[in-house]
């Protein structure tokens, strides 16, 4: 069965279900941090001449001006934590000895989660999904070998729910936790999405053995059964609906109360790899597909079936993931053209240019080929993005990218997994590569930053789920697999 140009057409390559992927030469350096543009990162020359997002980011992550007064004759530097605390005690800001939200973000954003890593879990199959709950109390990890684990972060990462998925096809492609954290949905390369009661007292949740995993059917009689798969699924902000992107070029909205699909929109001309909500209202939906386009859908205007509210052009290859800033204006996308792009929804067009695809004189397939060197410096002639970030690698799988947390960093950074087995962290405004986290020996498909603390979890096709922190808990971090192998050679 053919699902289009996605990461899942790999049966021809002889990959076996749940095979543990290890590539000993992929994670060569165990150093936690790499810095700035000198280490190979690149940002487009027009980076953030868009004054608004620049100013908003500074307002959310800069200290009160009285803390940051520059001493005459000295360069302006980030205000130290000691100075901030001393200023608070002396009531420099006039806030009665209290920090503002921006003051807190300024301090916390300086302490990146780069120490470690510490092993959280190790499975014998590829990790595809890793996500914190909204409040950071739970962590969800989805593996190719039918396992989804929910960890209680506040109880020492104890496994609260060990889910054995039902009717899994190829892998767990996505999961989503309901806003009240009571239900989890999981998707695979099937039109069936399953829902699990997270709050039940049963730890072992084997589908229809120890617990019922209700099936939500996104197909219709016209689809002829299992004719498509779901790449991305998200709960609505009120928990009453699901939105999903699929391999049949469509976006689906599922009404959980009515237990049926309430809307299907043919959204792209190829696989819809990613969907998400633009803000808390739930009215705006963002989608990205293998037609290289990002699209904006207004639920208040969905009567115009198959007609997006707007289109954003700029990627040269397929879009693998979209993350919204949450303000209904800005979002980022990862692309198979090896870039992250920052977008302003207000710059969207009603339709893409008549010839929005760039003519290329090369053939490649991201699932098993390196990106052609001659393509790396190409630029889309109609690029509508605000900024472009380069340095990481988007190959083999639908690698995900995110804004850093709002409450602790002011969304000052963006970060992404990478095919080169690392996690990359970029400064949103300057575009500098501020950290590279290296441990894994296979692609890092997903990673997630704790909403309140300098803690980041990376998950990889090597089966490892590891934690990066600042400053760490005092114990020795785990060694890279390559170093472990070298050590064993001497025994």
Image: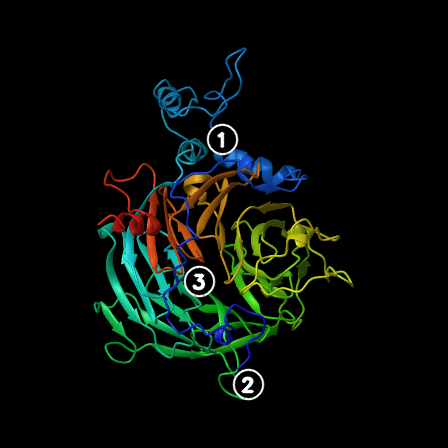
Residue 285 visible? The answer is no
Query: Which residue is found at the position 61% from the left and 41% from the top?
Result: 43
**105 relative to 143, above or below:** above
The x and y percentages for residue 314 are 67, 54
Along the polypeptide, which appears first: circle 3 or circle 2? 2
First in sequence: mark 1 vs mark 2: 1
Which residue corresponds to mark 2?
223
Q: Which residue is mark 3?
A: 238
Left or right: 162 with respect to 314? Answer: left
* Neighbourhood count class around disc 2 (C-alpha, 10 Å): few under 14, some 14–19, many 20 upward: few
| Local SS, label 3 | loop
With respect to residue 417, does 92 lie above or below? above
Q: CA distance from mark 1 to mark 2?
A: 53 Å
Q: Position of residue 291 (x, y in %)?
A: 65, 66
Check if mark 1's residue and mark 3's residue have beta carbons within 8 Å: no
Whether pointer 1 and pointer 2 mark residues with C-beta atoms closer than 8 Å, the reply is no
Q: Residue furthest top?
A: 72
Left or right of 155? Residue 173 is right
């Amino acid at each position: 069965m053919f699902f289009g140009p996605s990461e899942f057409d790999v049966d021809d390559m002889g990959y076996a279900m749940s095979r543990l992927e290890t590539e000993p030469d992929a994670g060569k350096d165990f150093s936690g941090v790499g810095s700035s543009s000198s280490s190979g990162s690149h940002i487009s020359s027009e980076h953030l001449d868009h004054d608004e997002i620049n100013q908003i980011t500074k307002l959310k992550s800069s200290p009160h001006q009285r803390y940051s007064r520059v001493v005459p004759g000295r360069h302006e530097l980030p205000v130290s934590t000691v100075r901030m605390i001393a200023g608070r005690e002396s009531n420099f800001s006039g806030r009665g000895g209290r920090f503002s939200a921006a003051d807190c973000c300024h301090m916390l954003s300086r302490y990146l989660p780069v120490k470690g890593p510490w092993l959280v879990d190790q499975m014998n199959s590829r990790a595809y999904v890793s996500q914190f709950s909204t409040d950071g109390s739970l962590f969800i990890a989805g593996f190719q070998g039918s396992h989804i684990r929910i960890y209680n972060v506040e109880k020492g990462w104890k496994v609260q729910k060990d889910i054995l998925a039902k009717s899994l096809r190829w892998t767990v492609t996505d999961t989503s936790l309901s806003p009240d954290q009571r239900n989890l949905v999981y998707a695979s390369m099937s039109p069936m999405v399953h829902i699990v009661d997270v709050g039940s007292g049963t730890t072992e949740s084997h589908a229809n053995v120890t617990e019922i995993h209700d099936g939500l059917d996104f197909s219709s009689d016209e689809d002829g059964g299992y004719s498509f798969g779901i790449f991305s699924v998200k709960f609505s902000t009120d928990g009453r609906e699901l939105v999903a992107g699929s391999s049949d070029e469509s976006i689906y909205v599922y009404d959980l109360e009515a237990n049926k699909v309430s809307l299907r929109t043919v959204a792209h001309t190829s696989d819809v790899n990613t969907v998400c909500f633009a803000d808390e209202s739930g009215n705006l939906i963002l989608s990205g597909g293998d037609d290289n386009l990002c699209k904006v859908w207004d639920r208040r205007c969905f009567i115009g079936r198959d007609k997006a509210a707007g289109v954003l052009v700029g990627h040269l290859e397929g879009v693998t993931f979209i993350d919204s800033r949450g303000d209904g204006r800005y979002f980022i996308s990862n692309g198979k053209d090896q870039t992250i792009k920052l977008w302003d929804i207000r710059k969207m067009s009603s339709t893409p240019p008549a010839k929005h695809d760039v003519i290329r004189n090369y053939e490649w397939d991201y699932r098993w080929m390196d990106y052609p060197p001659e393509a790396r410096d190409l630029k889309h002639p109609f690029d509508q993005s605000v900024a472009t970030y380069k340095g990481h690698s988007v190959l083999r799988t639908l690698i995900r990218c995110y804004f850093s947390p709002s409450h602790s960093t002011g969304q000052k950074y963006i970060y992404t997994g990478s095919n080169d087995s690392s996690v990359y962290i970029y400064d949103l405004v300057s575009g500098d590569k501020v950290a590279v986290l290296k441990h894994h020996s296979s692609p890092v498909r997903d990673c997630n930053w704790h909403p309140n603390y300098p803690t980041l979890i990376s998950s990889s096709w090597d089966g490892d789920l590891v934690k990066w922190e600042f400053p760490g808990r005092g114990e020795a971090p785990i060694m890279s697999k390559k170093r472990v192998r070298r050590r064993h050679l001497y025994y």
